[in-house]
Amino acid sequence: MPKMIASRLLRLVLTLLTVSFATFVMVNVLPGDAINALIPIDAQQDQEFVEQVREEWGLNDPMLVRYGRWLGNAVTGDLGDSIVTGQPVTAEITHRLPITLEIMFVAVGLSLLLAVPVGVFSAYREGKRPDRVISGFAQLGLSMPVFVTGLILIYIFALKLNWFPATGWNRPSNGIGPNLKTVALPAMSLAITEAAVYTRVLRSDMISTLKENYILSARAKGLTDRFVLFRHGLRPSLLTLVTVVGLSVGTLIGGTLVVEFLFAIPGIGRRIFSAIYQRDFMMVQGITVLITAFYVIVNTVVDVAYMVIDPRIRRTN
Amino acid sequence: MSESADLGVVGNQPTDDGGSESAGRATRFVGVLKRMPWLTKFCFTWLILLVSAATFADVIPGLHDPDYQGFIFGDGKTNDGPSASHWLGTDNVSRDILARLIYGARVSLIFAFSGVAVGVTVGCILGSISGFLRGFVDTSIMAFVDVMLSFPALVGLLFVTTLLEARGLFVLCAVTAIFIWPRFTRVGRATAITVSGQDFVSAAKAIGTSRRRILLREILPNVFPAVLAFGLVSMAILIILESTLSFLGLGVEIPTASWGGMIAQSRQDLLINVWPAIWPSVTLLMTVYSFNNLVDWLRAQTAVRSAAV
């Protein structure tokens, strides 16, 4: 297992290098000069001044030199300064990341809370009416774009019932209650689609698990259905679900971007959105690398979690 | 397994009995349609309606101009309810919602179809090569795919489309194609590995068939169905992606009608008139649902068939 983790770490580093370099190339090849973000267009008449700023920010160096410099700083934990605000990128990230993470975790938690019992029950009643109804709803949930779900929730719970605010964010330091109120709708918009995916995955794995002989013998021993389902059936059926949860971090990143846009939440997704608009390349670069790192790390953890869940895999490796 | 072996043989035969075979195929197709559950029938009909409406939008008699803002010239009301001339009412600048829905379908469908087309083509070819040849080629292709997959696609899309500043439908499709092919390649490769291990491939190798010929005649035709099935799943995902981009204001440029754009625009007047938000949302939902439902049904069909074999 240490060998496997080491190779995973190597791959993580390689991926990060490639992704950061690709972003860097993209920034430099595509139209849109960073100088426009630094100096207003009408102040660019003064060629000397423009040159001076270019020199100051190192924009005249060849691309590889600049990438090397960025990488050298990044290794020490310095992702550069925002071209627009002048603030360090890392400061901005540490300020905003907790918001995005909170939404994501609450969303995953909510969907698992919904998906595990529903998925197990659906598999237990395979082909019967409850299963068909659940599958129908799962198919519907799967077809809901995040922004449509969000709008429906806003319309019902914020505009009509006034239970939750339609937009904005309360940090936990303002109290847990107000914080939870602002996280509820965004997390729910993300959770509905995810729950549908999770339910389907768990259902199909559970159905094949329930056909195993040890389930039959557990039943034959006279154990209650619930005990058989949750103590004997659930754990071996979790494998695909765990993978999908790991992979869904990727979709969730996209989803939080939409949700933060929709609910006007000052998270990382909204920041990268505005950074792209402002041509704030340092910010885009930093956040992209961070997101990629997060995604790859989560999926590495998932691969390790496999072995914890299913001893059979531990043995074959 | 025997079915796939048959496929390889049939492909090599001259199709002199093509006429009767295609007739048989047609009756079988109708039979399959009849056996659909009612919901799937409904979804199928909806998709056919949608595709034909989008295709023939320009020649549908009586369909309004999707960009005509009548209220400027005094012959249209904004936020109007359904009426004889505007079946679904008008939006907040008095454009006909039905017309915009139909023209918006065009954008969605072209986007999704082109993405799937690129994905299936690249996925089949690269996946087959990767899965059949293995070794160094496989490792390098897959390393590239892995990197592409860990790149946050939505961020990349936003980035490229913003910086290009010109967001025609063609540019959007092209940029999406860059981010769509890795998943297809994964699917193609996984299938190619399974196919490569089968007896008819070993047989072809044993009689000294060249690797190129095996790749073209044995691997590719058998990888194609799996990748195509994934393509159908992707239709739903791509339609959602397109509408999300338009919703964020990064899809096709306004005033071109798109479902996401319509929803974004109606958002401001949600409390005044909720219909301009409901119509595109329902259309979008029904379309995505129809694709998902159809795919699930197809999957159940093929599962039954392979179980029967």
Image: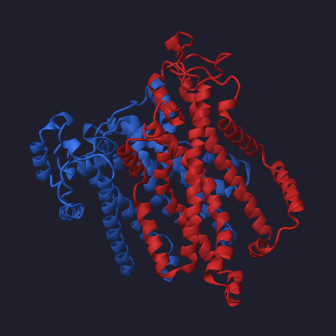
Chain colours: A blue, B red
How far across and how far down the image is residue A234, in percent? Answer: 56, 63
Residue drawn at point x = 39 percent, y = 35 percent: A263
Please identify the quarter of the rendering in which residue A205 is found: bottom right
Q: Nearer the viewer, residue A189 or B83?
A: B83
Residue situated in front as seen by the camera: B127 or A87 = B127
Residue farthest toward the right in the current orientation of the protein: B20
Q: Left or right of B27: which side holds B177?
A: left
Q: Residue furthest top?
A: B74
Q: How many marks?
A: 0
Residue pictured at 9% horizontal, 44% vertical: A48
Image height check: is A179 above or below B221? above
- Residue A31 in the image: state x and y as whole percent: 32, 48
Is A50 or A81 nearer to us in this picture? A50
Q: Point out residue A162 in the picture as x, y percentages from the top left corner.
A: 43, 25
Q: Judge by depth and name the residue closer to the eye, A291 or B48.
A: B48
Which residue shows up at 31% across the image and 69% down it?
A13
User: Can residue B211 be spotted in the picture?
Assistant: yes
Q: Is residue A111 above or below residue A295?
A: above
* A55 sits to left or right of A25: left
Q: Is residue A71 left or right of residue B190?
A: left
Q: Residue B23 occupies which quadrant of the picture? A: bottom right
Residue A241 seen in render: no
| x 65%, y 53%: residue | A122
In the displayed structure, does residue B24 sit left or right of residue B37?
A: right
Which quarter of the figure is the N terminus of chain A placed in? bottom left
Percent from the top left, x then y, of residue A165? 39, 30
